[in-house]
Amino acid sequence: MSTDSDIGRDREMEKIDIRVPQALLAEIDSVWEERGYANKSEFIRDALRDAVDPPTELSAEALQQLAESREQREDGETVSQADVKDRLGLDD
């Protein structure tokens, strides 16, 4: 899945240190390999590329998920985060 070989950019890599919440790191650890990446670094580089230069087209899977999400919202099957906090009496 990596686009490392597809990018005609500077091939020299620079190491950076970042801090991420443990919960986010756990999510990354649970998905990078199943999505076809050789390592966590490739996964994170692709995420950074998408943040800098977002894809212009959505995949068929993403479009399907958006349609399902829209239907769930219209059918009242989902609620907003604000509604949940209000129902539970939680502050922001």
Image (cartoon, helix red, strand yellow):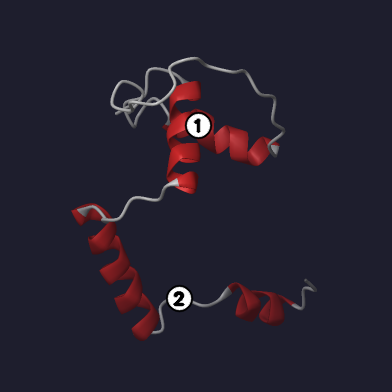
Label disc, if present, on residue 44 of the rendered structure: 1
Camera-nearest residue between 73 and 41: 41
Where residue 21 sits in the image (x, y, percent)? 70, 39
Q: Give the foreground label among 2 and 1.
A: 1
In the rendered view, tell whether residue 65 sits above or below residue 83.
above
Q: Residue at x 40, y 51 (%)?
A: 54
Residue placed under numbered mark 2 in the picture: 78
Quarter the N terminus occupies: top left
Dot 1 falls on a residue whose secondary structure is helix
| Residue 44 vertical placement versus 11 (above, below) | below
For residue 26, side relative to residue 22 (left or right): left
Tell me which numbered mark, 2 or 1, is placed earlier along the sequence: 1
Q: Are marks 2 and 1 in contact (CB under 8 Å)?
A: no
**Mark 1 crowdedness (10 Å alpha carbons): few <14, some 14-19, many ≥20:** some
Could you say which quadrant of the image residue 38 lies in?
top left
User: Residue at coordinates 70% horizontally, 25% vertically from top-left?
Assistant: 17
| Extreme-top residue of the structure | 12
Q: In this image, 26 relative to 8: left or right?
A: right
Taking the view exactly as shown, the residue that stands out farthest to the right is 91
Q: Residue 5: x, y in percent?
A: 31, 20
Which quadrant of the rendered structure holds the C terminus? bottom right
